[in-house]
Image (tube, rainbow, N blue to C red):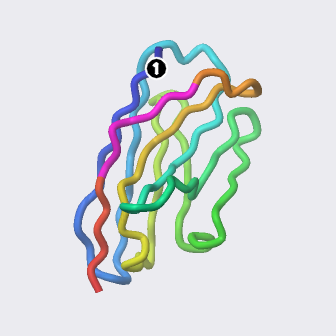
Amino acid sequence: QVQLVESGGGLVQSGGSLKLSCKASGNLNVAFTKSWVRQIPGKERETVATIHWGTGLTDYDDSVKGRFTISRDIPEKMIYLQMNDLKPEDTAVYFCNYRSYPSGSKDYWGQGTQVTVSS
C-alpha cells in the first residue's frame, strides 16, 4: 500500500502562484508514474501533469503548459506542482496520483487539496 498526502492548496487571485506538495509513504519499492490530476465539480478528472518514473520526463495538458511545472524529490518521497499565472478556470480539487509502471495495476490517490482562483 502507498499513502499520499497533498498540501499547499488555497485561495489565490488570478495571475498568482501556488505550489502543491505530495508526500508519499508505504511500499515505494515499485516503479510509479506520478501525476497531478484535477477535478472540477461536475466534470471528469483530468491529468494536468505527469512525471515518468525512470527518465523523469514530464508531460502536461495543453491547458497548463508553460504555467505549471511538475517536479520530484526522490529521497524525500515528494512530488510538487508549481502553478504560476493561475486562472479562474484552474479552480479545482487537485489530487496526487501514483500508478504502477508499466502495468498500471496499482493506482493510489491522495485525498485532494482545493485550489481556488478568484478573478
The answer to which of 39 and 58 lies nearer the viewer is 39
- The quarter of the picture where the C terminus appears is bottom left
Verify whether residue 109 appears in magenta. yes
Residue ranking furthest to the bottom:
119
Q: Which corner quadrant of the image does residue 31 belong to? A: top right
Verify whether residue 70 appears in magenta. no
Q: Residue at x 39, y 35 (%)?
A: 110
Q: Residue at x 51, y 38 (%)?
A: 97
1 left or right of 33?
A: left
Residue 4, given in percent of the width and then of the height, sits at 40, 30
* Rendered view: 77 above or below 72: above
Q: Amino acid at mark 1?
A: Val
Q: Which corner quadrant of the image does residue 48 belong to? A: bottom right
Question: Bounds of the magenta span?
Answer: 107-113
Q: Which corner quadrant of the image does residue 115 belong to? A: bottom left
The answer to which of 73 and 91 lies nearer the viewer is 91
Q: Which residue is denoted by mark 1 in the rendering?
A: 2
Residue 45, given in percent of the width and then of the height, sits at 50, 53
